[in-house]
Image (cartoon, rainbow, N blue to C red):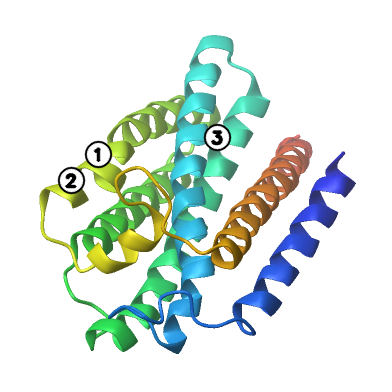
Amino acid sequence: MMDLIRAGAIVLITAVVVLAFTMPPPLASMQSGKEASRIFFFHVPMAQMSFVAFIVAAVYGISYLRTRRVSHDHRAATSAELGLTFSIVASITGALWARQAWGAYWNWDPRQLFLFVMILIYGAFFALRQATGDVEVRRRLSAVYLIMAGAISPFLYFVLPRLYTSLHGDANQVVLSAGSSNMSGAVGAVFASSIIGFALLYVWLLNLGTAAARVGDTVGAATDE
C-alpha cells in the first residue's frame, strides 16, 4: 500500500509541477495574478495540509493519553513535524507570491501573520520536546501540548483571518465564492491533483517518520543498556 501511495504522490506532484509552469497563470486577471500566481498550486495545498497535519497530531495526542501506546506518540510528533514543515514552505511560497502581488514579502496580512504564529507555536513544541529528558514525561507533555495547539489551530487558520481585511480577497475568489468554485476546469483539475498529491505525500512521510522514530527509540534503548 505504501508503495502505491508513494508512487501516487510522485506522479501527481510531478504532473502538477509540469502543468503549473506550462498552463496560463491561474489568477491572470486579478491583482494576485501574473506569473507568480503559479505558486497558487503549491502554496494553498501546503497550507491546507499543514492544518490537517496539526489536527492529526492532536488526535494522536489524545489517543496516546488514552492508550499510552508509544506508536501514537511517534505519529503525533511526526505529524506535528510535517505540519511545521508544510507551514514553513507555505509561508515562504506565500512571501514570494506576495512580493509580486503586493510589492513586499511581508505585508502584515492576517493570513501571513497567523500562519507565522502557528510556526512559532509548533517550533516551541519541538523545543519543549527536546528539553524534556524523562521519556514518559516528554510524551505526556507533548500530547497535552499538541491537543491544545490543535484546538486553537482552526481559529488561527479560518476564524481570525476572516475578522480582518485581507489582501487575499481576490485570490479567495478563485477558490470559493458563495460556496461555489470560480476555478476554470483546467485550473480546478490541477489544483485538486495538487491537494491529492500533497495528501499522499503527507501519508507517506508520516509512515516513514513514524518508522524512523521507532528505530530511534530502539537504538536509544540499546545504547542506554
CA gap between label 1 and label 3 equals 20 Å
- At label 2, the amino acid type is Leu
Q: Nearer the viewer, mark 2 or mark 3?
A: 2
How many other residues sit within 10 Å of disc 2, few (<14), some (14-19) or many (≥20)?
few
Q: Position of residue 199 (x, y in %)?
A: 63, 48
Image depth: mark 1 or mark 3 in front: 1
Residue ID for mark 3: 76
Q: Which residue is mark 1?
A: 155
Quadrant assignment, res 193: bottom right
Q: Quadrant of the C terminus?
A: top right
Relative placement, left or right, of 18 versus 80 is right
Q: For the residues marked 2 and 3, what is the alpha-carbon distance in whole angstroms?
A: 25 Å
Marks 1 and 2: in contact by CB < 8 Å?
Answer: yes
Residue 108 in view, yes or no:
yes
The residue singled out by tag 2 in the image is: 160
Residue 168 shows up from this direction: no
The residue positioned 58% from the left and 15% from the top of the image is 68
Across and down, in percent, residue 37 comes to 43, 78
Separation of marks 2 and 1 at Cα, in angstroms: 6 Å
- Which corner quadrant of the image does residue 123 belong to? bottom left
Of 134 and 96, nearer the camera is 96
Image position of 109 with respect to 8: above or below: below
Q: Which amino acid does the dot numbered 1 rest on?
A: Phe
The answer to which of marks 2 and 3 sits earlier in the sequence is: 3
| 38 on left or right of 166 | right
| Residue in the image at 61% along x and 26% along y | 72
User: Looking at the picture, which amino acid does disc 3 mark?
Assistant: Ala
Secondary structure, mark 1, is: helix
- Residue 42: image tag: none
